[in-house]
Amino acid sequence: MRKGVVLLLAAAVIFSLISFVHPASASGRTVFVAPIENEVERGLASFLQRTINEAEESGAETIVFELDTPGGLVDAAEDIGEIFSDTDLEIIAYVNPNAISAGAYIALNADKIFFSDNGKMGAAAVITSSGGDADLKAQSNWLAAMTNAAVNAGKDPEIAAAMVDSSVAIPGIVEDGELLTLTPSVAEEVEYSEGTVNSIDDLLTALGYEDAEVINLEPTFLENVARFITNPIVVPILLSIASIGLVVELYSPGFGVAGTMGFVALMMFFFGHLVAGLAGLEVVILLLIGIALIIAEFFVPGGILGIAGIAAVIASILLAGNSIVYMGIALSIAILAGVIGMVIMVKFLGKNLHLLKKIILSDSTSTDSGYVSNVNRHELIGQIGKTRTALRPSGTIIIADERIDAVSEGSYIDKDKDVKVVKVEGSRIVVREVN
């Protein structure tokens, strides 16, 4: 009896501790809060999809995404917009403080938008990686995407158009020649914002979730690594390191530091795209097949296996991202870096072997080093020897006790016949029978 009472008391204590650590909300409602920070790239979509999946599994009603982004890739933003539209959860965008460019598109795909006191949303013109204006086709596509997102959200599409196109003027809002960037007050005026709040707590109160259980999600370490690796600036750098490492390794005996760096860079590239959900198992299989074919080339002559292996590796890189065009550009940059690296290695640094003697194979079989492909025995011309074997027309002769391979001028010469050297052509010594 006493033992049962002790067990009940212990269970009560444990239950109270669990309730203290994870208090249940008074309303029984759950809200997820997650950040959308830094540049918008393909790896971000993986984290947002995980957040939505966990919220759906936990029975949450709403997800608040706190935006602080300067923008990023257009196609990545469109992917995120599709993720938002595919869920039945209420999506809240909290602009704190920046939803610029692609961030503005993400906010437009939310069910509601709130601003912080210093929030900004807009300036969504398409620019290239070099900072210039994109071509008309890309601009037209992005303009349609922004206006469609506004229409689907029940907002004025002209406001969204003014964020993309500087020629769109709205009296009292934005002048001709300027891109529209909404401030909190203007956003409320044009009904792009549900209100201005100072914090997440104030936002939850405004939504009626002040008593709800709030679950904050952050990207995991691997997701952060994947976001970094899939960044449009980092991808060509990793591929260039892999390309240059391969080039240096071709000039190096054995497998050294350069080859290791190139291999690690290539593995990081595929690891990041796998974690981000951009590459599947088929890409890994194609990569392994390519590597296996390249290794097989060292044992099977012909070159076909090597070419097929390189083609498989290139195909796996192109398929690792969700845009073959973008991956093709990154791969072209890497190949160019490899070619430049090869030129530098051969043309410039190859002359300063004291700098690279530990990684560059500097030995050569040149004539200056005493290496020759054959010895010209011109001193044998006119000398008399005796056939050691029959010449049919080639065989062996003896001159001054030295065995020498020789050929006749074309006729058969029997063994133990006197012969005279009449011609020396490289390693070919021609003799004639002496009567």
Image (tube, rainbow, N blue to C red):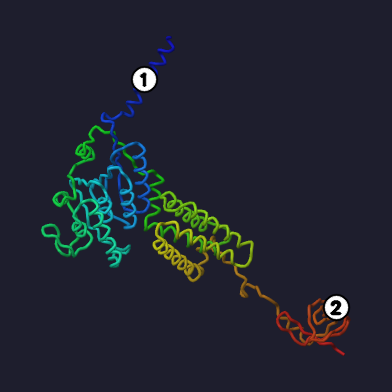
Percent coordinates x, y for residue 83 in the rendering: 33, 49
Work out which quarter of the rendered image holds the C terminus and state it: bottom right
Q: What secondary structure is found at the residue carrying circle 1?
A: helix
Q: What amino acid type should be assigned to the residue bearing mark 1? A: Val
Query: How busy is the neighbourhood of tag 2: few (under 14 within 10 Å), some, or many (20 plus)?
Result: some
Residue 364, located in which quarter of the rendered image?
Answer: bottom right
How far apart marks 2 and 1 lie (CA) works out to 107 Å
Question: Identity of the amino acid at label 2?
Answer: Thr
Give the residue at mark 1. Answer: 13
Q: In the image, which is nearer the foreground, mark 2 or mark 1?
A: 1
- Whichever of callouts 2 and 1 sits on the residue coming sooner in the sequence is 1
Which percent across, then down, holds residue 394? 80, 80
The image's mark for residue 201 is none
Vertical relation: 152 (above or below) 307: above
Q: Between residues 245 and 144, which one lies in front from this camera angle?
A: 144
Q: How many marks?
A: 2
Extreme residue in the bottom direction: 435
Instruction: Name the image quarter holding the N terminus.
Output: top left
Q: Is residue 220 left or right of residue 373?
A: left
- Asked which secondary structure carries label 2, the reply is loop
Tell me if mark 1 has few (under 14), some (14-19) or many (20+) residues whose alpha carbon lies within 10 angstroms of its own: few
Residue at screen point 85% across, 84% down: 413
Residue matched to label 2: 389
Left or right of residue 428: residue 96: left
Q: Check if mark 2's residue and mark 1's residue have beta carbons within 8 Å.
A: no
Q: Would residue 322 appear left or right of 113 to someone viewing this image?
A: right
